[in-house]
Amino acid sequence: MGPALFSGPNRNVHPEPSRHLLRIRLPGPLRHDFGFRYFEPMLKITKTDYDALRHHGEETYPHECCGVLLGKFGDDIHTVTSAVRCGNTRDDSPHNRYNIDPRELVKIQSEGRKRGEDIVGFYHSHPDHPAQWSPTDLADAHWIGCSYVITRVAKGKADATNSFKLSGMDENDKKFSDEKIEVS
Ligand SMILES: [Zn+2]
């Protein structure tokens, strides 16, 4: 009987379900289970690599050290699998500027790729200056999506390390935001 198919309530139609869902207030921890995940940017690094990049800054003090972080990109988590030292090519002002030779960078990148590693970030030191990015650091940062790790080396001792993620659409739009470092 054809017409009977259209009689009675249609179970497939729910009246405005989204309005009901929006009214539900969930306790904090449960929110993560409903698809609206919010990840804080994070840099995961081993204690060995973390200590190595800090020691590098102590060795080159009172000059800046610099290096490349190889690893894997996640959605918002970068995992460092090795920290590679670079020579600071700045000889005009090595105490507050750093520069990595592009040829050295290309070499590190291609060797990393052979091992399945990408460049996920860079590190440098701030001799006797805070572990915060400077306007020069932002101007010199071009790898959008990468992490920039800065260590303060106070009187020769590495005592603070912070990471900043470079985001934005392009050079005019780029900015640094704080990124948590997880040392394991
Ligand atoms: Zn700097």
Image (cartoon, rainbow, N blue to C red):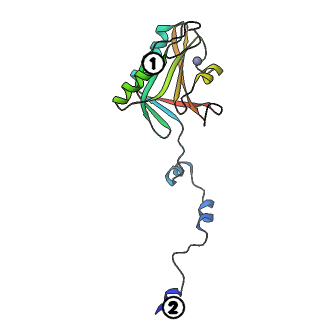
Where residue 104 sits, quadrant-wise, is: top left
Which residue is rendered at x = 53% and y = 33% of the image? 145
Q: Is residue 16 above or below residue 181?
A: below
- Nearest the viewer among 175 and 33 is 175
Report the amino acid beneath label 1.
Arg
Where is residue 175 shown, x and y percent of the image?
A: 62, 31
Q: Is 114 positioned to the left or the right of 148 in the image?
A: left
Query: What kind of element bears circle 2?
Result: helix
Q: Position of residue 21 (x, y in %)?
A: 59, 62
Task: Looking at this view, name the residue that lies furthest to the bottom.
Answer: 1
The three-letter amino acid code for the residue at tag 2 is Pro
As displayed, is residue 35 above or below residue 41? below
174 or 27, which lies in front?
174
Would the CB of label 2 be found within 8 Å of ligand 1?
A: no
Residue at (62%, 24%) from the top-left corner? 138
Q: Is residue 109 left or right of residue 29?
A: left
Q: Quadrant of residue 108?
A: top left
Q: Which residue is at 39% across, 26% downward?
A: 110
Q: Is 10 situated above or below 139?
A: below
Crowding at dot 1, Cα within 10 Å, few <14 / some 14-19 / many 20+, comes out as: few
Residue 40 coordinates in the image, percent (x, y): 54, 38
Disc nearer the start of the sequence (2/1): 2
Nearer to us of marks 2 and 1 is: 1
Distance of label 2 from label 1 (alpha carbons): 77 Å
Which secondary structure, mark 1? helix
Q: Which mark is residue 54?
A: none
Residue marked by disc 1: 103
- Residue 13, given in percent of the width and then of the height, sits at 55, 75
Q: Residue at x 53, y 41 (%)?
A: 39
- The residue to which callout 2 is attached is 3
Query: Within the displayed image, which quadrant is ligand 1 positioned in?
Result: top right
